[in-house]
Amino acid sequence: MGTLQASTSYSIGFGISSLAALPKPSTRRCVTVAKMEPSEKSVEVMRKFSEQYARRSGTYFCMDKGVTSVVIKGLAEHKDTLGAPLCPCRHYDDKAAEAQQGFWNCPCVPMRERKECHCMLFLTPDNDFAGEEQTISMEEIKETTANM
Amino acid sequence: MKISSKKQSLDEVYIDSCHELSVPVLTEETWDSLVLNATEPVVVEFWAPWCGPCRMFHPVISELAKQYTGRVRCFKLNTDDSPTVASRYGIRSIPTIMIFVNGEKKDAIIGAVPKTCLTASIDRFL
């Protein structure tokens, strides 16, 4: 059985940019079973980090802030449980070892080197899903993930 | 990508997210019976709860499930709940879609791609 190497994973960027737009903002989403909620403190840390890094890298949040919110919470959850904001959009055979190694800790190496964020947290302006904002409030995060 | 094809995919992507309920969930316990021993081709979405793009992608899988009713079985597998299966199939980036025929992995599509990419792949196995 072939194994998907990390190098192939970036095809997500192309796939996403070829889509026209998102489903409408998703405050009324009715599914998605979330696991344990991250601490409010870590969510706030990752929220601030995300705003700062978007500004610094010249990237923008997704036009569906629900995507942004879910990823920020995922980073916060990993910060709580692993001590590092490991990318929540990948599967790892050993999460603790990955967090220790650091390649996929946010901002991951592909983001830092090539502005590639397959999690869609930081989108370059030419991405079809990029919104116009580099800020997200705690209220927005709570609101867009309320039904999870 | 031309503008016209982008517009087309907008309609394809937007589906009421409540339809997500229609895609049944796979676990490690049900993997063999529902995927490996299935008589029809099987499409599996590997996803995780804190993956933003997955959240966007669920409606596409729901739509596929409806479109191929009776011909293809569509499932979702939470990689946090079933890490062994995800590791066995070398899942890295999420979401990843895999297509199985007679229990054998035939294709893997990585990322929140347009529905047309998935249907093109699935149609090859029907």
Image (cartoon, coloured by chain):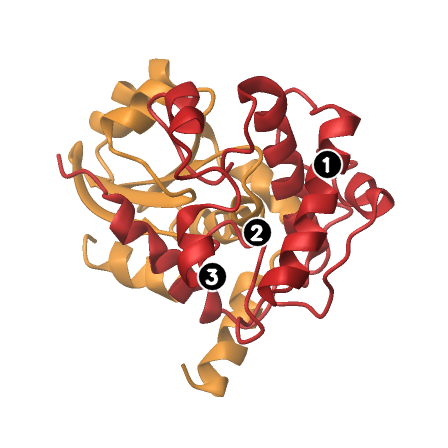
Chain colours: A red, B orange
Where is residue A25? Give x, y as percent: 73, 56
In what element is the residue under mark 1?
Answer: helix
Relative horizontal placement of residue B75, taking residue A84 as reference (left or right): left
The chain carrying label 3 is A
Identify the disc placed on residue A115.
Answer: 3
Asked which quadrant contains residue B92, the reply is top left
Instruction: Answer above or below: position of A124 versus A61.
Output: below
Calculate the distance from the C-alpha at mark 3 to the C-alpha at mark 2.
21 Å
The chain carrying label 2 is B
Q: Amino acid at mark 2?
A: Met
Calculate the distance from the C-alpha at mark 1 to the C-alpha at mark 3.
21 Å
Identify the disc placed on residue A45.
Answer: 1
Relative horizontal placement of residue A51, taking residue B87 as reference (left or right): right
Where is residue A60? Give x, y as percent: 64, 64
In what element is the residue under mark 2?
Answer: helix
For the point 27% across and 54% down, which residue is it? B122
Q: Quadrant of the N terminus of chain B?
A: bottom left
Pick the front one: B23 or B69: B23
> Which residue is identified by label 2?
B56
Q: Amino acid at mark 1?
A: Val
For the point 68% across and 45% down, which residue is it? A49
Q: Furthest-right residue in view?
A: A139
Where is residue A140? Give x, y as percent: 82, 48
Neighbor class of circle 3 (other Cα within 10 Å; few <14, some 14-19, many 20+) is: some
The chain carrying label 1 is A
Tag in front: 3 or 2: 3
In what element is the residue under mark 3?
Answer: loop
Task: Indicate which disc, 1 or 3, sits on the residue closer to the N terminus.
Answer: 1
Can residue B16 be seen in the rendering of this structure?
no
